[in-house]
């Protein structure tokens, strides 16, 4: 860093800026150069031994990787784009960071200061462009201020867990400025609010009087898996987790009901539908109003006061760190013995797990996904990182990855839910954790949005195992269209040989078409020293939808099944015909009921020895 003893010492403004980055522990930065970014490229050359420039093939990939870096490490991710088209390409990655609340710094090129505001080539009015996505958004006005502004930008990004954008006129970076020690990195402190015991006592009153309490845990519980288990066990509460909280608990923990909403495990949705109290812990779950009963008692814990009460009518709000809050709730509350509600949920979850497991050795061709997940789970190391794209593949990953709840990590594009997260996330994971095994899991749609950057994995020797689930469809949207009972349109994809494409970029490519091949190919992938793309040709079946039910004669009475069938007969259309046919075949028929919604569910949870939970569907 700078030298206070000799203020006459000069340094290029661009290098001074990178010194600030370095002081904050930033060791790599993603982007593509351009005319308006050359002074920073020059500085990056000078600083090449300490800050690695990662050349991506699309700025979106760089921004997405920066967001993924931040999600995985908690440290700020950094990306850049040149003025105009390079800048606009950043948006998806930046919005992903914004929605999943992680710090990212975007450096944006600008034409030279003298050319600004003259309608110059590629000059755009960048501040308003980035206004919505950012927590800090400035254009540098003098070379001397550039390092100060970047320092401030980093502080703000950390403070607000958001995106800071600094727009740099290209000429400034080349200017010599005094080399001053200006970084505030050493002053950086983080702290989380501690809960107020009065609020905890209020929460305890609700917990103690509830009959069917459920914990809904979000990413705020990351790092607090033990406290979460202690809380669940102390009060005999089943736990439902958000997608972003996947991996906080071991997936084989019996109290874990899985996730809710469309990515749900069935017991997850059913636990929410049946509960009379929600302990909503560190989450921004956008579907809370739909999936909890309207009259549920609601306790919300968050470190961000602006989130309290935002997702559901809330009875008790606790501003506090989830970990500390959970500890105190347990310490201050009386232990509650097991209940029929908990027992029912535990059994519901066991049924679901057994049902999922029953497909693991399926020899169906085209393949089901379960044999693939069986292999992923088999070869995954104890600290593996799983990066999941957006689509049916998200549902499958959330349901089938068996994470250990310790060092393994899961990441995806959570609330923004953009496709094209897999390959960039893989780059980020392997750069941040070179020693760890990294899987990316993408649909063919999501993969083909960003697959060019497999070449980036090759260039930087990042041996990621990329898995492409090829169903020749935007499957997730196809299922939505199916549910509307309208014509399917715009969803089928031209198939491609993704293994060959990967080989063309210098990666190792495999194609799996039959379950017999899975084991051998995953063995090879595990040993590979270069990036791998495994293209699995899967059948285009939607994952078992939450809006379907299993009519099991062991669980439902004849009358219940008849009543349900009648509902379907009443509906006479192509999809109900198919459903009836399935029911006629007997037990364990999977019946998908397009046109029915699970928005309103009634649950019968206190019938030990019987089915614990029954859906009653209502027509939309
Ligand atoms: C950038 C972007 N465009 C469109 C969507 C809407 N969308 C959500 S999932 C999906 C289909 C994903 O298809 P694919 O990657 O093949 O995965 P699959 O569902 O088939 O497993 C689409 C189009 C989105 N989330 N992000
Ligand atoms: Mg697909």
Image: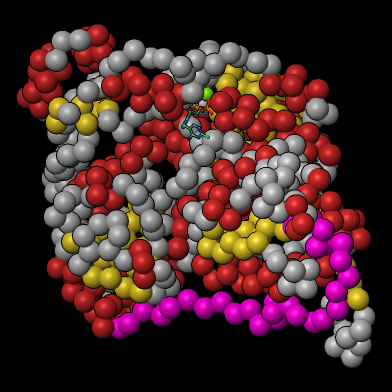
**Can residue 171 be found in the magenta stretch?**
yes
Q: Return the x and y of residue 313 as percentages of the image width and height.
A: 21, 60
Q: Locate residue 563: give its quadrant.
A: top left
Residue closest to the far bottom: 5
Q: Residue at x 75, y 80 (%)?
A: 182
Q: Return the x and y of residue 66 as percentages of the image width and height.
A: 66, 52
Give the quadrant of the C terminus: top left
Q: What stretch is highlighted in magenta?
A: 169-197
Q: Which residue is drawn at 39% across and 38% down?
A: 263
Looking at the picture, tell me which residue is in the foreground, 358 or 40.
Answer: 40
Q: Can residue 29 be seen in this view?
A: no
Q: Is residue 103 above or below residue 481?
A: below
Q: Is residue 186 above or below residue 171?
A: below
Give the quadrant of the N terminus: bottom right
Looking at the picture, tell me which residue is in the foreground, 229 or 263.
Answer: 263
Q: Can residue 183 be seen in this view?
A: yes
Q: Residue at x 65, y 15 (%)?
A: 496
Q: Which residue is drawn at 62% across and 42% down?
A: 88
Looking at the picture, tell me which residue is in the foreground, 553 or 55.
Answer: 55
* Magenta segment, prevailing SS (helix, strand or loop): loop
- In screen coordinates, is 94 left or right of 255? right
**Can residue 231 be found in the magenta stretch?**
no
Looking at the picture, tell me which residue is in the foreground, 266 or 487.
Answer: 487
- In screen coordinates, is 4 left or right of 191? right
Q: Return the x and y of residue 414 as percentages of the image width and height.
A: 48, 47
């Amino acid at each position: 860093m700078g030298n206070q003893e000799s203020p006459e010492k000069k340094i290029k403004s661009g290098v001074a800026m990178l010194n600030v980055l370095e002081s904050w522990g930033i060791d790599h930065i993603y982007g593509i150069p351009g005319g308006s970014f050359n002074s920073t490229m020059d500085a990056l050359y000078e600083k090449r031994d300490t800050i690695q420039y990662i050349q991506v093939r699309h700025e979106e990939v760089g921004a997405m990787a920066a967001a993924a870096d931040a999600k995985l490490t908690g440290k700020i991710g950094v990306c850049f784009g040149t003025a105009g088209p390079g800048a606009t390409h950043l948006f998806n990655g930046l919005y992903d960071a914004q929605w999943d609340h992680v710090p990212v710094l975007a450096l944006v090129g600008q034409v030279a200061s003298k050319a600004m505001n003259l309608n110059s080539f590629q000059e755009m009015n960048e501040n308003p462009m980035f206004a919505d996505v950012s927590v800090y958004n400035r254009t540098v006005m003098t070379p001397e201020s550039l390092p100060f502004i970047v320092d401030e930008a980093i502080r703000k990004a950390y403070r607000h867990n958001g995106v800071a954008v600094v727009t740099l006129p290209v000429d400034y970076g080349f200017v010599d400025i005094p080399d001053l020690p200006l970084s505030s990195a050493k002053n950086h402190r983080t702290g989380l609010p501690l809960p107020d015991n009065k609020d905890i006592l209020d929460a305890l009153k609700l917990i103690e009087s509830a009959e069917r309490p459920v914990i809904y845990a979000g990413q705020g519980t990351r790092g607090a898996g033990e406290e979460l288990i202690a809380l669940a066990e102390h009060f005999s509460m089943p736990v439902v987790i958000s997608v972003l909280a996947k991996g906080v608990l071991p997936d084989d923990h019996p109290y874990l009901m899985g996730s809710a909403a469309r990515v749900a495990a069935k017991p997850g949705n059913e636990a929410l539908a049946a509960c009379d109290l929600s302990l909503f812990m560190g989450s921004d779950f956008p579907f809370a109003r739909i999936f909890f009963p309207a009259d549920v008692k609601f306790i919300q814990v968050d470190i961000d006061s602006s989130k309290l009460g935002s997702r559901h009518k809330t009875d008790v709000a606790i501003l506090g760190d989830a970990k500390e809050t959970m500890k105190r709730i347990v310490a201050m509350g009386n232990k509650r013995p097991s209940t029929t509600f908990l027992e029912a949920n535990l059994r519901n979850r066991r049924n679901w797990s057994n049902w999922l497991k029953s497909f693991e050795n399926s020899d169906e061709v085209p393949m089901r996904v379960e044999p693939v997940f069986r292999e992923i789970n088999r070869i995954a190391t104890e600290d593996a990182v799983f990066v999941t794209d957006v689509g049916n593949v998200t549902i499958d990953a959330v349901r089938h990855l068996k994470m250990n709840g310790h060092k393994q990590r899961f990441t995806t594009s959570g609330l923004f839910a953009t496709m094209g997260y897999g390959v960039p996330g893989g780059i980020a994971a392997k750069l941040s954790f070179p020693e760890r095994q990294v899987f990316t899991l993408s649909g063919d749609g999501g993969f083909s949005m960003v697959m060019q950057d497999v070449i980036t994995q090759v260039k930087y020797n990042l041996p990621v195992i990329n898995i492409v689930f090829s169903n020749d469809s935007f499957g997730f949207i196809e299922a939505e269209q199916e549910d509307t009972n309208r014509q399917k349109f715009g969803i089928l994809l031209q198939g491609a040989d993704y293994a060959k494409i990967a080989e063309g970029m210098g990666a190792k490519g495999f194609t799996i078409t039959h379950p017999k091949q899975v084991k051998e190919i995953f063995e090879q992938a595990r040993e590979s020293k270069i990036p791998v793309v495994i293209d699995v040709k899967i059948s285009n079946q939607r994952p078992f939808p939450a809006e379907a039910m299993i009519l099991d004669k062991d669980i439902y009475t004849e009358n219940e099944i008849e009543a349900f069938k009648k509902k379907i007969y009443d509906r006479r259309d192509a999809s109900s015909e198919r459903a009836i046919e399935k029911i006629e075949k007997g037990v364990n028929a999977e019946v998908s009921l397009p046109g029915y919604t699970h928005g309103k569910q009634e649950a019968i949870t206190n019938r030990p020895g019987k089915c614990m939970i029954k859906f009653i569907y209502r027509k939309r």
